[in-house]
Image: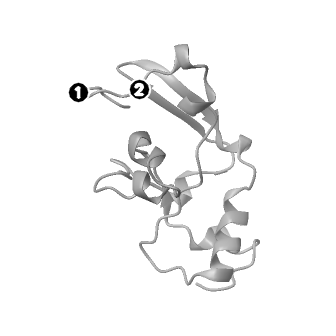
Amino acid sequence: ARNVSENDALSYVLGYCTGNDFTARDLQRVSSQWMLGKTLDGSAPIGPYLVTADQVPDPNRLKIECRVNGEVRQSSNTADMVFGCASLVSYISRYFTLKPGDIIFTGTPEGVISGYPKERQVWLKAGDRLT
């Protein structure tokens, strides 16, 4: 799909799932670009479930929550995104041809660790469970 109108954009969406955009902050700090800390094997896992688009009445009103070992670390809603889902699909299709199976990450919700004071920055450790 290329140059998709915002009105038609959601008709190109198969479904929705969660994804984690992990960053190795230690590697990110030693480079002038973010790429090194964001492009490691396994740094963008998705799923394990996909909800088909016909089961989601409004993708711009979905709760997003990340828990680490049962503790809520991030809680937001797609209603809080700067750009809605249709707008994102339309915009991206101006510059890239979208093909079946392509995945669009919408960005990080409120609650990024670097936005907290040092004493509240709790980093992931080996064995932590994310849900």
Packing grade of label 1 (10 A; few <14, some 14-19, many >=20) is few
Q: Position of residue 5 (x, y in %)?
A: 75, 78
The answer to whether residue 18 shows anywhere in this view is: no
Residue where numbered disc 2 is placed: 123
Cα separation, mark 2 vs mark 1, equals 12 Å
* Colour mapping: one colour
Image: 12 above or below 74:
below
Secondary structure at numbered mark 2 = loop
Residue closest to the eye, 55 or 42: 42
Residue occupying image coordinates x 58% and y 73%: 12
Q: Amino acid at mark 2?
A: Trp
Residue closest to the eye, 1 or 107: 107
| Figure quadrant of the C terminus | top left
Residue where numbered disc 1 is placed: 127
Q: Position of residue 41 (x, y in %)?
A: 28, 56
Report the residue that reaches farthest toward the top.
119
Q: Nearer the viewer, mark 2 or mark 1?
A: 2
